[in-house]
Each structure stands twice: as structure tokens, then as C-alpha cells.
Image (cartoon, rainbow, N blue to C red):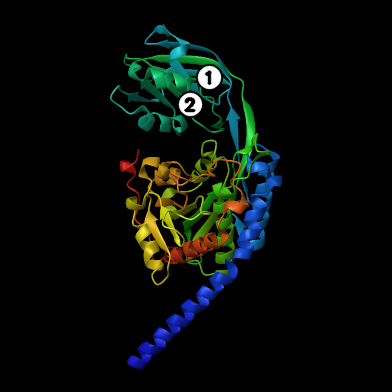
């Protein structure tokens, strides 16, 4: 028995060593540097949405996905195209409970060219009382997937007026949302308006490695490839390169695609996604998330700003929403014997779990978390022109990408399934 045990142990050690060698061979600093350098280069012009720079970045990512051996999720293109609409709503006329209602007390969000809303009807009514937290209850309704009328108590007049002046693009399939500032119950409501709309194309870049035995179960690796573009010059530099935010996360996704494509042993399907429009509202991840049945998504690894050392130093990162599922514990188990550690999010007051591209699927119950090292209380290059390649620790970033690959292996193999997020507890 001891001899057999010794042979088994030797085989495990040999297999682990071979796997580690292959991991280091594929996910290496030279390749990480190559991809990061291209994404964060000045000729990408800061990868702002609706600019030639972001189109150039998308084409580069798509070509790398193709070279890695991924397949498009649908059709023949790695570009997951959708549209945003820039509304210009005019001539609002409204009546509440049969009486004329002032336009200044209406916020109308719509992509329809001719708007004609009547209640009672198909609209759900949501009340925000004076005791409610408007930010927590009201702001998520801006992107509601169903048509809603939101009755806002006048106690929130100040934030209501600020919101009324906020101009925001909307997804082309967005539902109508109407905020009404009133203390009266809404029995009947009529709102009509004209809308001069401008449609603007966007695209995520998405590829897939179909699973061997569980092709209908998905594990997602994602990051956003857009950034802030070109702005006011600071010391002669006007390009917000976004090397850490989030060319670093996108580089990780591309490196993981290369690695798992070479492994060719994923039992579950692996989806690799580079999201657009995170910086302007998270629209890329919202559109992407609608393409999947959340019950079939077993885990999501969203990767955001891993180019600098965490507060614990090298060989460490944190997971947002760590306490909401047991996914962090699974990752830790898979990293036993290594010198890498995942920690819970040390910045709970920053609300990071809801601020990145994992949030849409997490709200649907998916164990969807963001992995990051960014010191959000002291990250001096965040959203500045100084977020450039030279500020990154590429060796440590390479080790983080390897750790993500190792930590995810039992989930990709179908051996571990993280617990679901309790969507009822989410705001």
C-alpha cells in the first residue's frame, strides 16, 4: 500500500509540476508585456467609447482571440455588437390624476421617438418614500429592464433636480422609466413627448471555448477595455491610457484565453469577454449579461486593475463581495501550496461589488466577483494621465494572472460549483 501510495503521490507531484511549467510557459511576462503595451499605447487614444481608438482596441482583442483558438459566441464575429441611443426629449406634456402636471417634476427616460405613456397600463409603480435611500432604491431603476413609474416623495427634491439635469445615453432596447416628484398617490398618469434620438454603435469582444462534458454550463472571465480617452493636457500629456484601468484586466482575460485554449481540458464552457462602456455606465456588461441564462452561469471572474501591488504587497489580491458566496474559499483551496493569497475586499465603504461589470449577473444570483489589487484609498494614478505602462508591476501582474488560472481550475473542471448570491439581499 505504501508503494502504491508513493507512486500515486509521485504521479500527482509530477503532474502538478508539469502543469505549473506549462502555466509559466504560456502566462509569461514577455507576453503580458506585449499585450499590455499595445492596449495602453498612445495610438489607442485612451480607448474612449465611440472613438476610433476603441475600435482599434476591439479589432486587436478580436484578432488575439482568434489566434488563441477561441470561437465566436454567435455568428462569425468576435464583436458582440449593440447600440446606445442618445435621447433628446422635448415638449413633455403630463397630467397626474386628471390634472395638468409640471414638466419640471417629471424625469422621462426613453428611446422611443414618439412617447405616449398612459397609466393604468403595463407600467409597474414603485414608490420612494421620504424614509427611503434614494441612491440605493432609485438609481438602479435608471436601467430597469421593465417599464416603471417611480413616485418620488418631495423630501428628495434636491437629488431629483440634480438627476433631471443628468443626460445619459441608453441602450437601444431600454424600457421607459418615468420619475414623478409628488406626494400624491398615482392613480392615473399621462405623459407625451417628442424624442430626437441618435443611435451610436458599440461592441463587446467575446469568445468561447466550448466545454467537453458540460457545454451548457459557463464560467466567465471578463474585464473592460474602454477608458477615458483624450482630455485636458497635464504637463503636456492629454491621453488617459488606462494601463491599469483596465488594460490590465483585459490583458489578463487574453492571457487566460491563451492558457485554457492550450489546455483543451475544460469540462465547462469558458467565455472570455472584453466589455465596452464600463466607464460611462457599464452598458457593455449589461448587454452581455442579457445573452445568458443566469442559472447556467456557474461563476464569473471579473478582473479590474491588477497592475499595481495590493495593500498586502505582492502575490495577493482581493475579491469583491467575498462574503456573498463561497467562491473565495474554493479559489483558496485550489491555491494551497502556493504563496498567493486572495483576501476579502478591504474597501467595503467604496461599494466596489456594485461598481464593476460583475454587478449585473450578481444581482441575478450568479457568483460573480471582481478580482483587483487597486488600493482604492490611495491609488494615485487612478483616472489620471499617469495611468501608463511604466507605473505597473508587470512581474506581479503575471503572477496574479497565473493565480487566477490555478484558482479557477476545479470550477472549470466541473468539480466545484460556487454557491449562489442571495439576490434577495442585494440592493
Q: Can residue 186 be seen in this view?
A: no
- Residue 344 in the image, given as x and y percentages of width and height: 36, 53
Residue that lies at the very extreme toward the top in this rendered image: 99
- Residue 31 in the image, given as x and y percentages of width and height: 63, 63
Describe the element under mark 2 as helix, strand or loop: loop
Residue 396 versus residue 202: which sits nearer the camera?
396
Q: Do the residues labelled 2 and 1 touch (CB within 8 Å)?
A: yes
Residue 162 versus residue 393: which sits nearer the camera?
393
Residue drawn at (43%, 49%) of the image: 294
- Residue 259 in the image, given as x and y percentages of width and height: 56, 66
Image disc number at residue 92: none
Label 2 neighbour load within 10 Å: few <14, some 14-19, many 20+: many
Describe the element under mark 1 as helix, strand or loop: strand
Image disc number at residue 115: 1
Q: Which of marks 2 and 1 is nearer the N terminus?
A: 1
Q: Indicate the quadrant containing the N terminus: top left, top right, bottom left or bottom right.
A: bottom left
Residue 199, by quadrant, is top right
Left or right position of 353 against 84: left
Residue drawn at (51%, 39%) of the image: 282
Left or right position of 377 against 284: left
24 relative to 7, above or below: above
Residue 349, by quadrant, is top left
Residue drawn at (40%, 19%) of the image: 158
Q: Name the residue under label 2.
A: 176
Residue drawn at (41%, 89%) of the image: 7
Distance from disc 2 to disc 1, alpha carbons, whole Å, reads: 9 Å
Q: Can residue 339 be seen in this view?
A: yes
Left or right position of 169 against 149: right
Residue 300 versus residue 234: which sits nearer the camera?
234
Q: Indicate the quadrant containing the C terminus: top left, top right, bottom left or bottom right.
A: top left
Count the numbered circles shown. 2
Amino acid at each position: 500500500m505504501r508503494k502504491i501510495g508513493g507512486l500515486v503521490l509521485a504521479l500527482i507531484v509530477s503532474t502538478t509540476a508539469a502543469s505549473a511549467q506549462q502555466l509559466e510557459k504560456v502566462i509569461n511576462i514577455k507576453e503580458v508585456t506585449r499585450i499590455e503595451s499595445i492596449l495602453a499605447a498612445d495610438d489607442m487614444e485612451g480607448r474612449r467609447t465611440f472613438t476610433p481608438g476603441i475600435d482599434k482596441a476591439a479589432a486587436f482583442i478580436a484578432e488575439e482571440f482568434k489566434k488563441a483558438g477561441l470561437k465566436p459566441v454567435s455568428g462569425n464575429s468576435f464583436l458582440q455588437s449593440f447600440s446606445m441611443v442618445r435621447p433628446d426629449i422635448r415638449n413633455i406634456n403630463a397630467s397626474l390624476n386628471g390634472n395638468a402636471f409640471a414638466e419640471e417634476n417629471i424625469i422621462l427616460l426613453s428611446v422611443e421617438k414618439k412617447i405616449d405613456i398612459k397609466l393604468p397600463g403595463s407600467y409597474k409603480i414603485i414608490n420612494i418614500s421620504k424614509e427611503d435611500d434614494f441612491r440605493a432604491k432609485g438609481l438602479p431603476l435608471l436601467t430597469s429592464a421593465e417599464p416603471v413609474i417611480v413616485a418620488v416623495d418631495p423630501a428628495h427634491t434636491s437629488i431629483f433636480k440634480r438627476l433631471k439635469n443628468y443626460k445619459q445615453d441608453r441602450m437601444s432596447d431600454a424600457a421607459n422609466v418615468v420619475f414623478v416628484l409628488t406626494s400624491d398617490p398615482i392613480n392615473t398618469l399621462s405623459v407625451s413627448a417628442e424624442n430626437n434620438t441618435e443611435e451610436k454603435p458599440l461592441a463587446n469582444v467575446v469568445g468561447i471555448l466550448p466545454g467537453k462534458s458540460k457545454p451548457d454550463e459557463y464560467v466567465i472571465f471578463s474585464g473592460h477595455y474602454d477608458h477615458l480617452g483624450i482630455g485636458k493636457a497635464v504637463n503636456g500629456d492629454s491621453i488617459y491610457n488606462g494601463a491599469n484601468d483596465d488594460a490590465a484586466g483585459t490583458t489578463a482575460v487574453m492571457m487566460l484565453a491563451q492558457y485554457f485554449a492550450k489546455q483543451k481540458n475544460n469540462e465547462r464552457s469558458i467565455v472570455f469577454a472584453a466589455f465596452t462602456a464600463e466607464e460611462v455606465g457599464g452598458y457593455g456588461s449589461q448587454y452581455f449579461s442579457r445573452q445568458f441564462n443566469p442559472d447556467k452561469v456557474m461563476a464569473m471572474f471579473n478582473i479590474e486593475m491588477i497592475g499595481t501591488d495590493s495593500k498586502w504587497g505582492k502575490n495577493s489580491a482581493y475579491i469583491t463581495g467575498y462574503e456573498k458566496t463561497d467562491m473565495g474559499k474554493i479559489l483558496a483551496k485550489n491555491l494551497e501550496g502556493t504563496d498567493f493569497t486572495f483576501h476579502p475586499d478591504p474597501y467595503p465603504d467604496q461599494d466596489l461589488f456594485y461598481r464593476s461589470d460583475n454587478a449585473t449577473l450578481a444581482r441575478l444570483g450568479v457568483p460573480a466577483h471582481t478580482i483587483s489589487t487597486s488600493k482604492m484609498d490611495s491609488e494615485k494614478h487612478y483616472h489620471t494621465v499617469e495611468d501608463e505602462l511604466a507605473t505597473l508591476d508587470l512581474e506581479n501582474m503575471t503572477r496574479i494572472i497565473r493565480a487566477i488560472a490555478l484558482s479557477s481550475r476545479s470550477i472549470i473542471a466541473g468539480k466545484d460549483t460556487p454557491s449562489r448570491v442571495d439576490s434577495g439581499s442585494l440592493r
